[in-house]
Image (cartoon, rainbow, N blue to C red):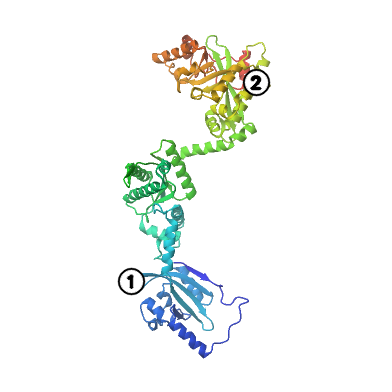
C-alpha cells in the first residue's frame, strides 16, 4: 500500500519548542518497562535501519522472539522496501529529514493468514534513533471493505452499482492513456506494491494488475441495456415482484458475461446503473463483432420467461452498443454515445440491439444544433421564402404559387424545409415560424397584385402544420394577416398533409371550417400516401387535392407505362371533380407527364418542368411574361 508522510519535513523547523530536560534513570526504567509489556508491537531502530530492541508483541506478530529481531533490518521485517515511495519516506525519517511517517502494509502472520498492519516510524528525541510501531488493523480494514462493498453494490441485484461502474470505467480509460504515453516514450509508469486488495487498488495498481493478466487491445466496449415495459410490471404487480425480476435479469446478464470466458473482476463488468438500466463493460474488447455477439446472447437469454415464485413473466430489452479505441475516449463521451444508441434501439422498435453509428450521431448533433438555434433564427431574420409556380395544365398559365421556406443558416448554409420543419414541430417553434411564413407570403402575393393590376392575381399556397392548428389561434392569425396585407381570402390556400387533415376532429376541424367559411381554400397535400379515407372528403371543408409525386413519377416511362398508375390517378381526379374539388399534380418533370395528366383531366401541375422554387422577382417576371415557363 502507500506510505503517507506526516509532520514537518525537518525535525526542528523555526519556532520548534526547546528540547526537554534529559530523562532520569527512573523515567528511563519506566519507559523500558512500558516498551516491553506494551500490546502495541514496537522496535527501536538505529540510523542504519537495524533493530536495536524489539518488544515481545512485535516478536509475536512476526512469529519469533523479540530478542531474535536485534540487528535485523527493520524495513525487511515490515516490507518497507516494496516500493520506492515508501522506502524513500522511511529513509528520510532515519536521516532526520522527516519528523514522522506512516504507511499500511499487508503482512503474513505466522499461522499463515494475511493481516493488515499500520506501520508508524517516528524519531525518539535525544537518541538518534527512531521508534517503529506496528498496529494490527485487519478488523478495521475488513469493516472498511464490507462498508465499501455495500456502498459500491446494488442491494437488489448485488451487482456493482453506478459508482463502482464509473470507477472501473475511469480506471480502464486512465490505463489506456498511461499505456499510450508509455508506448510513445518507452517509460514504465509507477505501480503500487503487490498484495493490495482489489477494492482498494488505485488506477496505477489496477494498471499493473491488468497488464500482467490479459493481453491488451487498447479498446473498450459497452452494452447499455434498458428493459422494455418494466414500469408496467411495477405498476401492475408491485415493486416486490419488480425487484425479483431485476435480480433474475442480473443473474442472466452475469451468466452471459461469464460465458464469454471472463470474470466480473477481470473482464466484463455487469452493473446496475439505476432503475431498469444495466451496463456490461468490456475492457480490451476485440472489435464490434465481440460486442454484437454479447448483445445477441443477452437478448436471447432474456427472451426465456422468468419464473418468479410460480408467476411467469416475459421481458425484452433494448441495448445500445458502443465499441471504440480507449485512448482519447472519456467516460462521459462513452456514456453519451451509449445513451444515444440505446435511444435509437428504442426508437427502432425495442427488443433489439443497435450499434453506435458516428454518421447517424453527427446527424443527431446537427439536428440538436438546429433545434437550439431555430427560435432565435426567426427573430434574426435568417429565413426566406421562395415560390414554385402552380400551372394550369389546360392553358399553361401560372395560376398560383406555393411558398417554400428556406433557412439561411450561418453554419450549415441554405437548408430546405425537410431539414428543420419537423424539428420546429417538435419544439413548438413552428407556430412562430408558420406565422412569419404566412404573413410574408400574403404580403408578397398582395405586392404582386399591386405591381400587376391588369393581370389575373395569383393565389399563394402556404403549408400549415397540424400543431399550428392546436397550439395557436390559426383562424385569428389568418384573419388578422389578411386584414393587414389586404389580400383577398380566396387568394390564400392553406396546405395540410393528408394524415393531419384526415385525423381532424374537434378544434382542428372547427378551425378548418371557419377558414373555409372565411373564403380561404384548404388543400390536402401529398394525397394518396396516408389514410386515403375517401369518406372524409365529403365531410371536410377541402377545396383542393394535391396528388403525391409518387403517382406522377409512375408516368415517366412512356414506353413501358403501367396502366394501373393512370387508372388510379384518373379515378382520383374523377372522384375529386364529382365532389367539387380541383386536383393539383406534384412533381411534374416531363412534357409527357404533363400531357397524360392533361388528358386525364388534372387541373394544375407543379414541378421542375415548369420551374423550381425561385425568388419573388422571378415570379414577377413570369407574370410580366419576360421569363417563360420551361414547358
Residue 132's place in the image compared with 429, above or below, is below
Identity of the residue drawn at 51% across and 75% down = 93
Q: Residue 111 location in percent, x, y?
A: 33, 73
Identity of the residue drawn at 68% across and 22% down = 484
Residue 485's place in the image compared with 202, above or below, is above
Residue 341's place in the image compared with 157, above or below, is above
Q: Residue 368 location in percent, x, y?
A: 53, 38
Q: Which secondary structure, mark 1?
A: loop
Q: Report if residue 84 is visible in the image.
A: yes
Q: Which residue is the site of mark 2?
A: 482
Residue 58 figure quarter: bottom left
Q: Report if residue 319 is visible in the image.
A: no
Q: Nearer the viewer, residue 506 or 569?
A: 506
Q: Residue 167 location in percent, x, y?
A: 45, 55
Q: Nearer the viewer, residue 46 or 449?
A: 449
Label tally: 2
Question: Looking at the image, do the residues carrying marks 1 and 2 touch, with CB atoms under 8 Å apart?
Answer: no
Mark identifier at residue 617: none
Q: Which secondary structure, mark 2?
A: helix
In this view, which residue lies farthest toward the bottom?
25
Horizontal side of 451 relative to 590 (left or right) equals: right
* In this rendering, the label closer to the viewer, 1 or 2: 2
Q: Which residue is the site of mark 1?
A: 112
Residue 184's place in the image compared with 598, above or below, is below
Q: Nearer the viewer, residue 598 or 489?
A: 489
Q: Residue 606 location in percent, x, y?
A: 53, 17
Q: Residues within 10 Å of mark 2 (few under 14, many from 20)?
A: many
Q: Nearer the viewer, residue 403 or 349?
A: 349
**Alpha carbon distance from label 1 to label 2:** 95 Å
Q: Residues within 10 Å of mark 1 (few under 14, many from 20)?
A: few
Choose the circle earlier in sequence order: 1 or 2. 1
Amino acid at each position: 500500500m502507500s506510505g503517507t508522510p506526516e509532520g514537518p519535513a525537518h525535525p526542528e523547523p523555526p519556532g520548534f519548542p526547546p528540547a526537554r530536560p534529559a530523562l532520569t534513570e527512573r523515567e528511563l526504567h519506566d519507559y523500558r518497562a512500558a516498551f516491553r509489556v506494551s500490546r502495541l508491537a514496537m522496535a527501536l531502530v538505529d540510523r542504519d535501519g537495524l533493530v536495536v530492541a524489539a518488544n515481545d508483541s512485535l516478536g509475536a506478530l512476526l512469529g519469533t522472539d523479540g530478542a531474535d529481531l536485534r540487528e535485523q533490518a527493520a524495513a525487511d521485517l515490515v516490507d518497507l522496501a516494496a516500493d520506492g515511495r515508501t522506502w524513500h519516506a522511511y529513509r528520510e525519517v532515519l536521516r532526520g529529514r522527516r519528523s514522522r511517517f506512516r504507511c499500511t502494509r499487508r503482512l503474513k502472520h505466522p499461522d499463515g493468514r494475511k493481516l493488515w498492519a499500520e506501520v508508524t516510524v517516528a524519531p525518539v528525541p535525544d537518541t538518534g534513533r527512531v521508534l517503529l510501531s506496528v498496529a494490527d488493523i485487519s478488523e478495521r480494514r475488513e469493516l472498511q471493505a464490507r462498508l465499501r462493498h455495500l456502498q459500491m453494490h446494488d442491494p437488489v441485484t448485488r451487482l456493482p452499482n453506478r459508482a463502482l461502474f464509473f470507477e472501473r470505467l475511469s480506471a480502464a480509460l486512465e490505463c489506456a492513456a498511461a499505456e499510450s504515453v508509455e508506448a510513445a516514450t518507452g517509460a514504465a509508469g509507477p505501480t503500487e506494491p503487490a498484495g493490495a486488495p482489489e477494492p482498494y487498488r488505485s488506477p496505477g495498481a489496477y494498471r499493473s494488475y491488468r497488464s500482467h493478466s490479459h493481453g491488451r487491445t487498447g479498446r473498450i466496449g459497452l452494452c447499455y441495456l434498458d428493459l422494455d415495459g418494466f414500469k408496467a410490471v411495477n405498476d401492475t404487480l408491485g415493486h416486490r415482484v419488480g425487484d425479483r425480476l431485476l435480480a433474475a435479469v442480473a443473474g442472466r446478464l452475469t451468466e452471459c458475461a461469464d460465458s464469454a470466458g471472463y470474470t466480473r473482476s477481470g473482464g466484463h463488468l455487469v452493473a446496475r446503473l439505476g432503475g431498469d438500466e444495466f451496463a456490461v463493460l468490456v475492457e480490451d474488447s476485440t472489435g464490434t463483432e465481440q460486442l454484437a455477439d454479447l448483445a445477441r446472447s443477452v437478448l436471447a437469454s432474456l427472451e426465456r420467461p422468468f419464473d418468479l415464485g410460480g408467476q411467469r413473466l416475459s421481458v425484452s430489452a433494448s441495448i445500445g452498443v458502443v465499441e471504440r479505441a480507449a485512448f482519447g475516449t472519456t467516460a462521459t463521451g462513452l456514456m453519451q454515445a451509449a445513451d444515444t444508441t440505446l435511444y435509437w434501439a428504442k426508437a427502432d422498435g425495442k427488443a433489439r440491439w443497435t450499434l453506435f453509428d458516428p454518421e447517424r450521431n453527427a446527424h443527431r448533433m446537427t439536428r440538436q444544433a438546429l433545434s437550439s438555434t431555430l427560435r432565435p433564427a426567426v427573430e434574426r431574420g435568417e429565413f426566406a421564402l421562395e415560390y414554385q409556380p402552380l400551372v394550369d395544365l389546360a392553358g399553361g398559365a401560372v395560376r398560383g404559387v406555393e411558398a417554400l421556406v428556406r433557412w439561411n443558416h450561418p453554419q450549415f448554409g441554405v437548408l430546405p424545409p425537410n431539414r428543420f420543419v419537423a424539428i420546429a414541430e417538435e419544439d413548438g417553434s413552428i407556430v412562430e415560424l408558420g406565422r412569419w411564413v404566412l404573413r410574408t407570403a400574403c404580403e408578397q402575393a398582395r405586392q404582386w397584385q399591386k405591381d400587376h393590376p391588369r393581370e389575373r392575381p395569383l393565389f399563394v399556397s402556404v403549408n400549415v402544420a397540424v400543431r399550428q392548428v392546436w397550439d395557436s389561434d390559426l383562424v385569428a392569425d389568418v384573419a388578422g394577416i389578411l386584414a393587414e396585407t389586404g389580400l383577398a381570402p380566396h387568394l390564400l390556400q392553406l396546405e395540410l398533409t393528408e394524415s393531419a387533415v384526415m385525423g381532424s376532429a374537434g378544434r382542428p376541424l372547427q378551425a378548418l371550417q371557419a377558414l373555409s367559411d372565411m373564403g380561404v381554400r384548404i388543400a390536402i397535400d401529398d394525397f394518396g400516401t396516408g389514410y386515403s379515407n375517401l369518406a372524409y372528403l365529403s365531410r371536410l371543408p377541402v377545396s383542393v387535392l394535391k396528388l403525391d409525386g409518387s403517382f406522377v413519377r409512375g408516368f415517366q416511362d412512356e414506353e413501358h407505362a403501367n396502366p394501373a398508375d393512370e387508372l388510379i390517378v384518373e379515378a382520383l381526379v374523377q372522384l375529386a371533380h364529382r365532389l367539387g374539388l380541383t386536383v393539383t399534380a406534384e412533381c411534374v418533370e416531363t412534357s409527357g407527364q404533363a400531357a397524360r395528366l392533361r388528358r386525364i383531366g388534372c387541373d394544375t401541375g407543379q414541378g421542375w418542368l415548369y420551374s423550381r422554387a425561385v425568388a419573388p422577382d422571378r415570379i414577377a417576371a413570369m407574370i410580366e411574361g419576360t421569363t417563360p415557363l420551361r414547358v
